[in-house]
Image: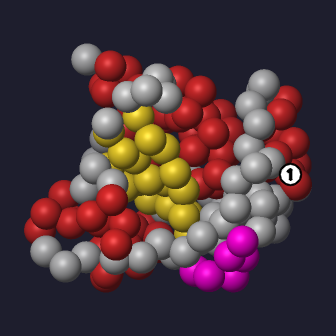
Amino acid sequence: MTRILMVCLGNICRSPLAEGILKSKVSKDSFFIDSAGTAGYHIGNPPDIRSIAVAKKHGLTISNQKSRQFTKKDFDSFDFIYAMDTSNLKSILALSRDENDKKKVKLILNEITPNEDLSVPDPYYGGDNGFENVYKMLDEACQRIANKLKR
């Protein structure tokens, strides 16, 4: 089973969406998808209601997810770790123990625009349109990931 982790700052906006989107695109029998945050601000909380709403609008349910913090153990538990932005990428890499850990970590938007190191904007302080825009970015990136994994 391939194990994939989506990571943002608080694990309530972007990474829960990415988790839900990718889960909808791959087989539950072959893939385990989870999400985490680099900060512990929201541990145990469900996703932001705006993330839940935009997911629901697109036919996905993410309301049962609970925020958790990324730990060094995640390097052992996951094959691929996708960071939502460059700040999260740096935080994850700072916890890496070796090159093997580092090889697992990628910026999610590099799946769409390779080597451009673009960040998924944090929609937390923006309006509802920010969540829709983030959903669209993540949907495209997750489709690329799913297509690669199905090969």
| Residue named by callout 1 | 50
| Viewer-nearest residue: 121 or 17 | 17
**For the C terminus, which image quadrant?**
top left
Task: Give the magenta-colored segment's residue range.
Answer: 39-44
* x and y, in percent, of residue 81 in the image: 37, 55
Task: Give the residue displayed 31% in from the left and 82% down from the top.
Answer: 94
Q: Decide: few, some or many residues near mark 1? Use Cα within 10 Å; few <14, some 14-19, many ≥20.
A: some
| Viewer-nearest residue: 80 or 93 | 80
Task: Give the residue displayed 80% in from the left and 48% down from the top.
Answer: 63
| Viewer-nearest residue: 73 or 52 | 73
* x and y, in percent, of residue 76 in the image: 27, 64
**Chief secondary structure of the magenta portion:** loop
Task: State yes or no: residue 42 in magenta.
Answer: yes
Quarter of the image for residue 96 reads: bottom left
Task: State yes or no: residue 17 in magenta.
Answer: no
Seen as rendered, the residue at the extreme front is: 29
The answer to whether 56 appears left or right of 13 in the picture is: right
Q: Determine if residue 110 is in view.
A: no
